[in-house]
Image (spheres, grey):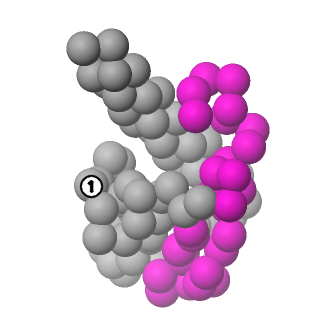
Amino acid sequence: MGEKDKMKIKLVKTCFACPEQYDLFFEDKMIAYIRLRWGRLYCSVPDVSGKIIYDYQFEDTMKGMFDDENERKKYLKIIKKKINEYYTELNKKKKKENKK
């Protein structure tokens, strides 16, 4: 997965609100988890118990869902970029290790 694969990430909303959350898939494999609850929006890879690669705290600590579709698109776009960067770097490290 790298720069050219951005559009292949599939988001599946698993909860509508409190928390609003998503599982993200690439080629039918879960690659990330996104959750917005108590004003905290974060993304972990490859799943809920994985490494947090994005963490944002909204001013409204009761926020459990995005205010509207524009806000949702804005933050999901940022997170998708972070996911792509994470896996691109991970793949580079793996290729480097395989050359040794």
Residue 78 on image: x %, y %:
52, 40
- Magenta stretch in the rendered image: 1-28
Residue drawn 32% across the image and 47% down it: 53
The residue wearing badge 1 is 51
Does residue 28 appear anywhere in the picture? yes
Above or below: residue 35 compared with residue 96 = below
Above or below: residue 51 compared with residue 40 = above
Above or below: residue 98 compared with residue 69 = above
Above or below: residue 91 compared with residue 78 = above
Task: Please state, as top left, top right, bottom left or bottom right, where the N terminus lies in the image.
Answer: top right
Residue 26 highlighted magenta (yes or no): yes
In the image shown, does 30 or 56 lie closer to the viewer?
30
In the image shown, does 77 or 97 lie closer to the viewer?
97
In the image shown, does 1 or 58 lie closer to the viewer?
1
Does residue 60 appear anywhere in the picture? no
Answer left or right for 28 relative to 37.
right
SS category of the residue bearing label 1 = strand
Residue 28 on image: x %, y %:
68, 61
Residue 23 highlighted magenta (yes or no): yes
Residue 87 on image: x %, y %:
45, 36
